[in-house]
Amino acid sequence: MLKTKMNLKNGIRFICECQKNVEVVSFGFWFQFGSAYETKTHNGISHFLEHVISKQEFETFIENRGGKVECITSKEYISFNVTVNKSDFLNCLRKVADQIFSPRITSEIVESERAVVIEEIKMYQSDFLEYVLDNISRCIFKEQSSLSLPILGLENNILNFDLEQLCDTWYNKILRSPLVVSINGGIDEKQLCEALDYIENIHKENKSYKISKVEYCPSLIVEKSLHDISILNILSCFKTSDIYQHILPEIFTFYLTNSGQNALLIKELRKRGLSYQTFSYYLPYTIVGVWGITSLFSSDNLLEVINTIKSTLESAAQISSEDFERIKNMAINQSVILYETTSERMKFQAKNSLLLREDVFIDNYLVRLSEVDIKDYISFVRDMMNREKGYLLFHNDEISDKNIFI
């Protein structure tokens, strides 16, 4: 398996894993620009532009060859990802790159996608759980932080973006932001050299952007529920600097909820008949990590749910060596399954290179995961327990007792 990673003279970060006996290739262009680099008046412009650019001719070009296109906007990146038969790889790479760097942003495309994005915002807001999760950022980050801005933006902003403003943002901000080109799949050395030669000759100016100052906001935010259910988000915030600080929260979330019905927190809540759905998550950003738990339950179970989560978190820091090794091995096996496809491996490479500033291939990650020590894990869990936490509670009735902090 041939692995290549390098910084090109034009400032593009290139990372590639060539696999033998694989008939497909996945590649992606990942720009470090998203809602976290926007202002309130421009909020949503990154996602809107992702729609506009993906409606260039390359989408039809790829799909007519049986390939797949997936475009993503997050708080910290915009990505254009493609999976094709390896025989079509070079033609598709050139087509996508040409239209990303020299798009035809027309008023017809802008107006068409304006309507589509507004519909997407409405659908997102009508999905109660998605709407609640979007409020996580508002709960844990103070309003002056750009990380608190929603990825989709506001309908009024979308209505007011004009063609000149969109073109200026695309050419002068997004195309100048740090870029990672990630490739994974069945290409040979000749195709790799041709792809590398093409990408090296892309004309690119480079400018780095910084997230506005992040201020953590430990608070209880209560909102009326749209349904006959309560949802509690419990959130902690911590700095990130290396991949180990990403692996530890991933193991923790896996232990609590992601290992299925036998997961520690799910098992404790369900045997008491308390929760309809519970999951934990880890959101990594370049300068901060957000770890959290979300639980759905009926309103009269509030205090019992809180007490069960509290006691479960305390027991999570008292894990035995045997249980730790079991959970770690389950996490390794789940990662092997998750990153089986070329597209997931490619996205893993790109995210780590772009956000962590570290090139990590799946094999390296699995080795690091296997090397995590129980002492590091226990230290991390206790640190999470001792941190102040932010809370977002969607509730139907008046909360008479707001002293619910863990």
Image: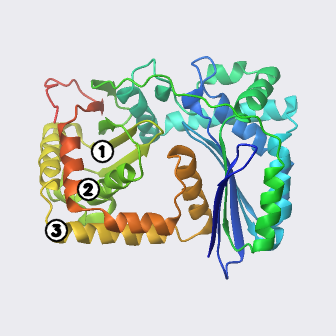
Point out residue 199 in the picture as x, y percentages from the top left corner: 79, 53
- Write the residue at 35% across / 29% down: 140
Kindly check if marks 2 and 1 are in contact, taking CB atoms under 8 A apart as contact. Answer: yes
Look at label 3 and name its amino acid: Ser
User: CA gap, disc 1 to disc 3?
Assistant: 24 Å
Q: Write down the quadrant of residue 331 in the picture.
A: bottom left
Point out residue 51 in the picture as x, y percentages from the top left corner: 72, 40
User: CA gap, disc 2 to disc 1?
Assistant: 9 Å
Residue tagged 1: 293
Q: Quadrant of the N terminus?
A: bottom right
Look at label 2 and name its amino acid: Leu
Disc 1 secondary structure class: strand
Look at label 1 and name its amino acid: Ile
- Write the residue at 30% across / 39% down: 229
Q: Is residue 378 left or right of residue 98?
A: left
Residue tagged 2: 256
Q: Give the camera-side residue of 259 and 86.
A: 86
Disc 3 secondary structure class: helix
User: CA gap, disc 2 to disc 3?
Assistant: 16 Å
Residue tagged 3: 321
Q: Is residue 347 above or below residue 206?
A: below
- Write the residue at 71% across / 68% down: 25
Dot placed on the residue nearer the N-terminal end, 2 or 3: 2
Q: Nearer the viewer, mark 2 or mark 3?
A: 3
Disc 2 secondary structure class: helix
Q: Is residue 115 left or right of residue 135?
A: right
Mark 3 surroundings: few (<14), some (14-19) or many (≥20) residues within 10 A: few
Q: Is residue 391 visible?
A: yes
Point out residue 170 in the picture as x, y percentages from the top left corner: 75, 31
Mark 1 surroundings: few (<14), some (14-19) or many (≥20) residues within 10 A: many
Mark 2 surroundings: few (<14), some (14-19) or many (≥20) residues within 10 A: many
Q: Is residue 69 above or below residue 330?
A: above
